[in-house]
């Protein structure tokens, strides 16, 4: 096993592990509950970590996470005139769905 990355929080770590697994890369999360010890231990030692099960997948896994970090965000103009950014498919202002 090899440590691949340290995540800023449990939610991000879980998303990374799930995405890696869907891509066929065996991964697991460590230090899941260590955040409760923050203050007693240095905070950077309490962050959740993503670990690879098979060391030979390291290059592929690092490239996959790098690509995941560069996913372009959508931006569209709703009929009501509101600019909607990010991954939203519905206007927060009027509730209309993103055009196809």
Image (cartoon, rainbow, N blue to C red):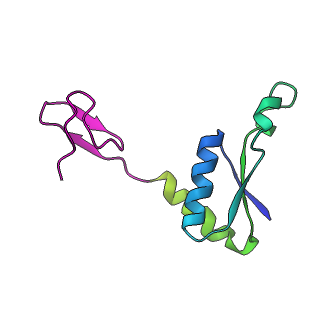
The residue drawn where x is 26% and y is 39% is 90
Depth check, front residue: 3 or 28: 28
State whether residue 14 is above or below residue 41: below
Check if residue 15 falls in the magenta segment: no
> Residue 67 in the image: x percent, y percent?
50, 59
Dominant secondary structure, magenta = loop
Residue sitting at the far left: 79
> Residue 5 in the image: x percent, y percent?
69, 52
The residue drawn where x is 67% and y is 72% is 57
State whether residue 93 is above or below residue 3: above
Numbered disc total:
0
Q: Quadrant of the N terminus?
A: bottom right
The residue drawn where x is 77% and y is 39% is 33
- Left or right, 73 with respect to 12, comes to left
> Residue 45 in the image: x percent, y percent?
81, 39
The magenta region covers: 71-100
Residue sitting at the far right: 40
> Residue 52 in the image: x percent, y percent?
72, 63
Q: In the picture, residue 11 is in which quadrant?
A: top right
Q: In the picture, residue 75 is in which quadrant?
A: top left
Residue sitting at the far top: 39
Check if residue 76 falls in the magenta segment: yes
State whether residue 61 is above or below residue 93: below
- Left or right, 18 with respect to 93, comes to right
The residue drawn where x is 59% and y is 44% is 12
């Amino acid at each position: 096993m090899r440590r691949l990355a340290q995540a800023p929080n449990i939610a991000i770590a879980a998303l990374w592990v799930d995405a890696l697994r869907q891509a066929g890369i065996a991964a697991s999360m460590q230090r899941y509950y260590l955040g409760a010890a923050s203050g007693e231990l240095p905070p950077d030692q309490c962050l959740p970590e993503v670990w690879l099960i098979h060391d030979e997948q390291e290059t592929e896994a690092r490239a996959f996470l790098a690509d995941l970090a560069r996913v372009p965000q959508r931006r569209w103009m709703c009929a009501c005139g509101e600019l909607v950014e990010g991954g939203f498919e519905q206007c927060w202002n009027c509730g209309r769905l993103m055009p196809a």
